[in-house]
Amino acid sequence: MNPAMRKTYIGIGILSIIIGLMMLIVPHQCIKAIVIILGIFSIGNGIFNLFSIRKLIADSNFVKTITIRGTISIIVGLLAIFLPLVFAGILWTVMVYTLAFYLLISSGMEIYSIIKMKQVGINTKPYIAEIIGSIVIAIILLIIPAKIGTLIVRLLGIAIMIIGVGLLFFEIKSKPLVVYTEEVPENSNKDKD
């Protein structure tokens, strides 16, 4: 393997371990950094759309669409930079609460279904376990919505660290043996005779 590629893999492995540790130790700051980086890319994409893509086609509808797209991209990027995680946190919380209420409503509907199934003699034990599981999950979601996001980031951090360690291990184990050849000049044997 090319020595430059080996150094690259070793560097990626070390960087992966560092990023994984950061995600494990300070997950909220890592999420904020990712949101800010995405915001910067969004602003760049909006500027590129407004100054380059918009000029590709002279169609007025195309120009209007690209102008709107570029402007929205810049606005979203600015919001991502200046309000990291405010929107992501709110959307995450809304989604968790929506899922929790869905599970509770679904459990209520399933209780009604179980009553109807019992009336016709259908075994309802598996459905009771599903109702209990849904209610327990809904309660957990209602109690700790922010902790789940943190847990996911930490799990991703662990996965990235494992990948980094794997890269380093692979590079160490696959290090080529260096064999130096000895060059013997042809005349050296003639002088001894």
Image (cartoon, rainbow, N blue to C red):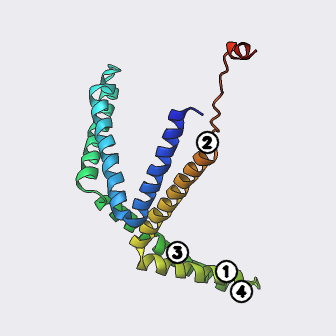
Q: Which of labels 4 and 1 is toward the front? A: 1
Q: Give the CA separation, mark 2 to mark 3.
A: 53 Å
Q: Which of labels 2 and 3 is toward the front? A: 2
Residue 104 or 189: which is nearer the viewer?
189
Pointer 2 local density, CA inside 10 Å: few below 14, some 14–19, many at least 20: few
Residue at left offset 42%, top offset 55%: 18
Question: In the image, residue 71 lies at what x, y percent?
Answer: 26, 39
Residue 168 or 23: which is nearer the viewer?
168
Which label's residue is closer to the chain start, 2 or 1? 1
Which label's residue is closer to the chain start, 3 or 4? 3
Amino acid, disc 4: Lys
For the C terminus, which image quadrant? top right
Q: Quadrant of residue 174?
A: top right
Residue beneath disc 1:
127
Q: Give the CA separation, mark 4 to mark 2.
A: 67 Å
Residue beneath disc 3:
103
Residue beneath disc 4:
118
Residue beneath disc 2:
175
Residue 68's place in the image compared with 89, above or below, is: above
Residue 58's place in the image compared with 6, above or below, is: above
Question: In the image, residue 35 lies at what x, y percent?
Answer: 34, 52
Which label's residue is closer to the chain start, 4 or 1? 4
Residues at badges 2 and 1 in contact (C-beta under 8 Å)? no
Residue at left offset 49%, top offset 39%: 8
Q: Give the CA separation, mark 3 to mark 4.
A: 22 Å
Residue 39's place in the image compared with 5, above or below, is: below
Amino acid, disc 3: Leu
